[in-house]
Amino acid sequence: MKKLVLIICLVFAYTQTSSAQAKFGIKAGINYNSDSFEEVKDDVFSGAKSKTGFHAGVFVQAKIPALGLFLRPELVYTSLSNEVQYNNSVQTKTTTYDFQKLDIPVLLGTKVLKIGRVYGGPSFQYILDADFDTDDIRDVEADGFTVGLQFGAGVQLGRFGVDLRWERALSDTETKYVNGITNSESNFDTRVNQIIIGVSLEL
């Protein structure tokens, strides 16, 4: 968590001092986790069906005049969920796996044809909470800090913006849990790749 706080402070401090043309704004949108539950280490889960989540946050966008680029760090709250089937040693059941995280994309981009933009960069993530919607699976603990990459494009019409992004998870997101039937501890990798659609408003 200390690393995450340090990253936030450094990124936002840079944007405050690097250019007098920094723009601030708010953003929100939907997330679709297109791939998840990789490398399951036991036979409890048979897979996961992606569900639509949401995000909301703030951003700063500052020009880098010497390069003709812009730097756009963001601080975003994201909520995602999957519908999963699992075997509780008696029967196959369905439940929902929910998790919430803080995302800090640090994007480097350029404008295209005055109203368009393309960008990419790392996304630092901190898992806030994770849980299953069933008593059969309990004591859920997920890795705190993970890293991914975001790439995308968007358009800016005055103060209003629309963006489409793809996020690729890089580091493992290991989740540990206790099977409520057998009281055995297991773990699996819940890294996700996302398609992100967002709207923004410059303040």
Image: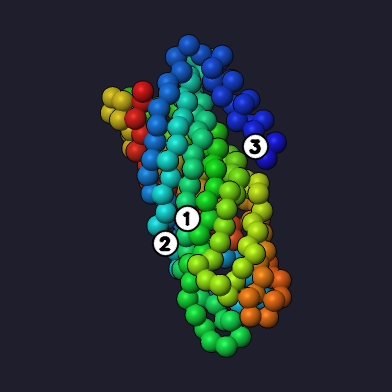
Instruction: Tell which of 102 and 169 is nearer to you.
Output: 102
Give the class, few, some or many, for how many residues have Cα within 10 Å of label 1's Cα (few <14, many ≥20).
many
Figure label count = 3
Which residue lies at the image location 46% right of the left edge and 24% below the top edge? 61
C-beta proximity under 8 Å, tags 3 and 2: no
Q: Which mark is residue 166?
A: none
Which residue lies at the image location 59% right of the left edge and 20% below the top edge? 13
Give the class, few, some or many, for how many residues have Cα within 10 Å of label 2's Cα (few <14, many ≥20).
some
Q: What SS does tag 3 mark?
A: helix
C-beta proximity under 8 Å, tags 3 and 1: no
Question: Which amino acid lies under the numbered mark 3 shown in the image of this protein?
Answer: Leu
Residue 60: percent from left, percent from top: 47, 26
Residue 106 visible? The answer is: yes
- Identify residue for label 1: 80
Split into 4 quadrants, where in the image is the N terminus?
Answer: top right
- Identify residue for label 3: 4
Residue 113 visible? The answer is: no
Mark 2 or mark 3, which is nearer the start of the sequence? 3
* Label 3 to label 1: alpha-carbon separation: 20 Å
* Label 3 to label 2: alpha-carbon separation: 27 Å
Which residue lies at the image location 52% right of the left edge and 30% below the top edge? 73
Give the class, few, some or many, for how many residues have Cα within 10 Å of label 3's Cα (few <14, many ≥20).
some
User: Please, is residue 60 above or below residue 180 in the view?
Assistant: above
C-beta proximity under 8 Å, tags 1 and 2: yes
Q: Is residue 196 rendered to the left or right of residue 86?
A: left
- Identify residue for label 2: 51
Q: What SS does tag 1 mark?
A: strand
Q: Is residue 170 rendered to the left or right of residue 26?
A: right
Mark 2 or mark 1, which is nearer the start of the sequence? 2
Which residue lies at the image location 51% right of the left edge and 76% below the top edge? 85
Question: Which amino acid lies under the numbered mark 1 shown in the image of this protein?
Answer: Leu
